[in-house]
Amino acid sequence: MASSRPRWLYRFVRDRSAQTETVGVILILGLVIVSTTAVVAFGSAAIDDVQTQSELDRAENGMTLLDSRLSTVALGDAESQRIDLPTTSGSYTVDPDAGTIRIVHRNYDGTNDATLVPTTSLGAIVYRNGDRSIAYQGGGVWRANRGGAAKMVSPPEFHYRQGTLTFPLVRVEGSGGATGRAAVTAQSTGDGTPVYPNDSAAYPDGSDYTNPVENGTVEVIIQSEYAAGWGSYFETRTDGNVSYPGPNTVAVELVSIGTLGDFQMPPETQGLTVRGMDSGHSLEDFSFTVRPQDTEQSSFANLDWSLYAQQGQQQFEIHVGGNGVNGCNEDVALALYYSDDGGQTHHGWYSDDYLETECGEVNGKPADGDEIWVDVDLTNESATMNYEEIKSNDLTHFKTGTLVSDANFTTHPDDPDVSYDTNDDEEVAMITRHYFAEMGPGFDLVVADGNNAGIGESGSSGYIYYEGSGKVVTYLHITKHNVTARVS
């Protein structure tokens, strides 16, 4: 009996081992089948992704070539071009309604807007493969990837440099489509049409579309599937204010430079607009001539005239005056005043002999003593002024407080590390450039004519020039260029 137990146990272990071997074989076969299915499934998907990516890369290269060829058509260097586009899958189409552009000059007259380019279709030549696409639009190539923002492949025909915006507006028209390989035939529909400057166009107030651009801001608004790519380009290539006012919409706004170059003196209570001035001592030249309404020499007897600016607590005034100026070559006083606390304290600069009246021939009239004027050069690096308290009667607009002792010009990198106390001298150019930098980057210099001075602003004129910051547009060159394309 004792010997039967091992035989029974042996049979039990033997049977269990046989079952385990069978289960193991089944499990191994199952794992092989599952693994093979997974490899086939995922491998197929990976192969499809690789193939799709390869097709997109080939289409991208083709679109880049298309970009260079179509630019020659759009900008008039060639009448037509034919381009073969690769890939064996996906489709190419011409979409004349893809995207729009609008260009607006906001506050062109200080209050109102003017539409330079109304909402206009950009059009596009588009390659699509599933939910991914590559497009030629606006003279650039753009790529929209699955689940991500559109990106730029090659830049559009939008060039901004040192305050000059050059924008050949390329519009794609046409029709056609093809699957896989395709050919694009493109033809120019004529020379570019000028938009700005344009002798035959005018603002609502009647002023011409001419450079330099003054007042307000110029805004370019683009609605497109590829708006994110446009926006990235604007942010990289300009210092303009870029915003996204709506779905698939981007806008870039550039500040106009304001008054620049020659100007006629505005009438009393109106002013010169300084806008978009670069930081530091970017004022290079500021000079003007003051003439009386009546050209008689005695007309300057009550000379009391200013340009002033105010922003918050900042006050700045340039005053030209004198008592009893009745003839030629007589001294005229010049005062420069600045306060940053609303007039409680101030910086004051004064000269009673830097300026003088001049007489001579004007507009063909003889120098018979009837013509008189004062030339004011505020960027003269040879003349100096004295730091001293400015009395209220030495100004036309502001009332002065206590003179600041130890006034310093260390605010800006261009200024020397120096402080000024009563009776210290400094050159006129340094003083003017410093306070322009303090007031900048934008302010209005308003004309104030006091004490019955009788200044003839219509006969007075000047010249101002300053470097603009990167957000400024000084010169605007916009043209329209239509391209008719057909995909087959």
Image: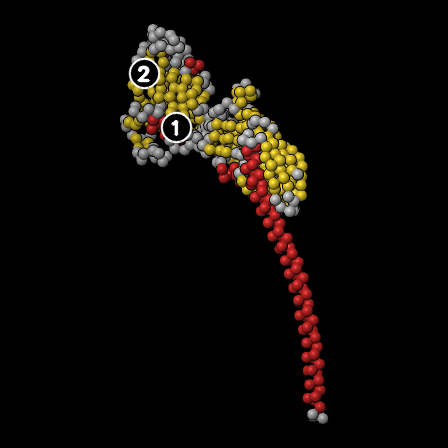
**Label 1: how many Cα within 10 Å (few below 14, some 14–19, many 20+):** many
Place of residue 170 in the rendered image (x, y in percent of width and height, measured from the top left): 57, 32
Q: Label 1 amino acid?
A: Leu
Taking the spot 45% from the left edge, 24% from the top edge, the residue there is 259
Q: Could you tell which of marks 2 and 1 lies nearer the N-terminus?
A: 1
Q: Is 359 placed above or below 251 here?
A: above
Observer-nearest residue: 193 or 85?
Answer: 85
Which quadrant of the structure image shows residue 114?
Answer: top right
Label annotation for residue 385? none
Which quadrant of the structure image shows residue 38?
Answer: bottom right
Check disc 1 and report the residue beneath it. 283
Label 2 sits on a secondary structure element that is strand
Taking the spot 42% from the left edge, 13% from the top edge, the residue there is 459
- Whether residue 295 is visible here, answered yes or no, is no
Screen quadrant of the N terminus:
bottom right
Place of residue 211 in the rendered image (x, y in percent of width and height, measured from the top left): 48, 24
Taking the spot 37% from the left edge, 28% from the top edge, the residue there is 433
Label 1 sits on a secondary structure element that is strand
Observer-nearest residue: 328 or 269?
Answer: 328
Place of residue 166 in the rendered image (x, y in percent of width and height, measured from the top left): 51, 30
Check disc 2 and report the residue beneath it. 356
Instruction: Look at the numbered discs 2 and 1 and tell me whether their residues touch, using CB distance below 8 Å.
Output: no
Place of residue 213 in the rendered image (x, y in percent of width and height, measured from the top left): 49, 25
